[in-house]
Amino acid sequence: MSITKATRHISQNEGLIFEKSSPGKAAWKLPPLDVPEVDAEKLLGSSVRNDLGEMPEVSEIEIIRHFTRLSTWNYAIDLGMYPLGSCTMKYNPRVNEVVVRLDRLANAHPYAPEKISQGALRILRVLSDALIEITGMDAITLQPAAGAQGEMTGLLMVRAYHESKGNARKKILIPDSAHGTNPATAAMVDYAVENLKSNEQGMVDPAALAAQMNDDVAALMLTNPNTLGVFEHEIAKIADILHAKGGLLYMDGANMNALVGKARPGDFGVDVMHLNLHKTFSTPHGGGGPGSGPVACKQILEPFLPSPVVITKPDGTLGFEYDRPQSVGRVRAFYGNFGMFVRALAYIMANGPDGLRQTTEDAVLNANYIRKELTGTFDLPYSTPSMHEVVFSDKLQGKNGIKTMDLAKRLIDYGFHPYTTAFPLIVPGALMIEPTESESKEELDLFVEAMKSIAREAENEPQTILDAPHNTRISRLDETAAARKPVLRWKRPS
Amino acid sequence: MAYPADRKYTKEHEWVMADGGSASIGITHYAQESLGDIVFVDLPKVGSEITAGKMFGSVESVKAVSDLYAPASGTVTAVNDSLATTPEAVNKDAHGSWMLKITLKDAGEVSALLSAADYEKFVAEEAGK
């Protein structure tokens, strides 16, 4: 089988670290004790623990080799394209890493007095101002640890706002194309979820929304562009319908990579939204994390932001304000994932306004290039213009018994990370592809060639696809058996 | 797929087979087919109350977790415990794998549900979409 591969799979055999263990082997040796020895049992009493359970006993080089070999099994954006839709797996620029490792930033302590933390506070302020300008909102918190926590913070603020008006209201409207985190968030802040059906273009239908909108609705949670990669062009009308009945518009910022520098949610009627610094603003996503999910809002919601917020004090220095009686409270220890703020700010400053705009244009161009090249080869269920991602379906391959998951598994053989499978739910058998601006035309062509080759295989040798992946260390896993009868821990062979 | 005429069906893809004042409940062949390989079935305890149209449990497949909705109101008298260890029975024979038995609060609730023929028509429309 001769295929053009983007990357090569490394297949180093490696067992569990427990299997390398032998009694008494150690990776350390301490000098002789030069202080009086103490009896742990005497000091700790019944809290002392003598049985430490099963621990691997290995040498230093064995530890190093074990984890180095494991690391070679990873797939990463540094190895090749990672086209997971709605995940915005873009390149993490090295300049971000240079800046965040500067000694005085890397070693800054959250308990250091404000007086000697002015630089760190200024990073929070400058990043906040930049994100406010990009989103067109009025105020922001950088605290939430990632997108889902950002959603929860935003909805807690929505609830606090309605409560301050004397009625918390009962439900949140959510389109059927939404990310699963949206209804989960609504339920967690004790709102009922009401489903909003998409129209034939895959968008919110203003007439249907108007029919469902009433005084019980606290907010609509909307992703724009939505999960089909389609811009909700009736967004201003949607906002008006909500506002007319006292409801709020929450925007899930997962797909903000299609808007930065081109359109501002604050200008099209959004009241509160979260951003994902680990998507749109190039901080590591996935295993590399952690995430960061700032929440930006309009003035009416500002009193409810988590405390503390950064303020300019009367003497002109920066500090934290904790006395915020209407705040929903702290949502994260200290001030959020500070290292991500530094990286995101480095990205924003390195690109500048024109660079960020270009980034958005390139992301949209790349998705549309893939759409153009693969339409016909794969079924395109919604022909509405695409923004930063494109959603195909497995309908054409389905007649040979091949589903989106099978195609994705085969894509691994070609050296790419799979696209997002089976989402959004409104497209049966979805292939959701988001290349981001990071990919060159050369890499996109390699991807297109791989997808076309897989489609040919689906016609001529479907079994090759059904058994894929073939070139990885481990072939197709039995996911059903793994879920039905999971093996959760290693046991020493008797 | 021919749906057995000895029971009634809901638009949420549950079946209910009444026998005097009691009934057994399961999910349809179409439901198991759309879910894919089922790996876990979460059911209420004997003695608990279920209410028509409200959630009473969930089914987890490799693809997703889906809620189960009660086709009728009543008190749970038996739970099919074998599904805890062999959830694949639902994939193999959805109409033969009951999940709950209940005493019906109002037998009229069952007779108002879809007949096998009506359900078949409903599924054909839903699948054709």
Image: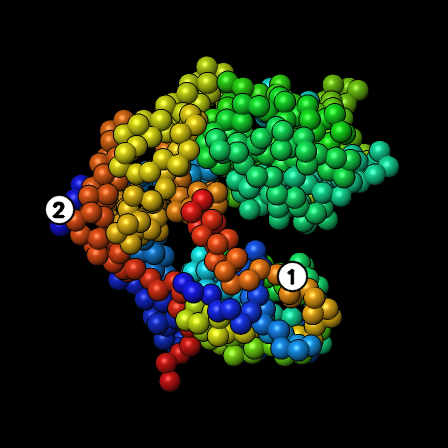
User: What residue is drawn where x is 57% and y is 20%?
Assistant: A264
Is residue A68 something that shows in the picture?
no
Q: Amino acid at mark 2?
A: Ser
| Secondary structure at numbered mark 2 | loop
Q: Are marks 1 and 2 on the same chain?
A: no
Which residue is located at x 62 percent, y 18 percent?
A267
Considering depth in this image, is B20 or B129 the residue closer to the camera?
A: B20
Whether residue A131 is visible here, answered yes or no, is yes
Q: Position of residue A369 (x, y in %)?
A: 32, 26
**Could you say whether the residue bearing mark 1 is in a helix, strand or loop?**
loop
Using residue A422 as the reference point, say whether residue A183 is left or right of it: right
- Mark 1: amino acid: Ala
Colouring used for the render = rainbow
Q: Are marks 1 and 2 in contact (CB under 8 Å)?
A: no
Tell me the number on the disc at residue B112.
1
Badge 1: few (under 14), some or many (20 or more) residues near its Cα, within 10 Å? few
Which residue bears the numbered disc 2?
A2
Q: Which mark is residue B18?
A: none
Please provide percent x and percent y for residue A431.
37, 42
Cα distance, mark 1 to mark 2? 60 Å
Q: Position of residue B118 (x, y in %)?
A: 52, 57
Residue shown at 43% from the left, 65% from the top: B2
Toward the right, the furthest residue is: A166
Q: On the rendered structure, is A307 left or right of A150?
A: right
Viewer-side residue, A436 vs A313: A436
Q: Which one is in front, A41 or B128?
A: B128
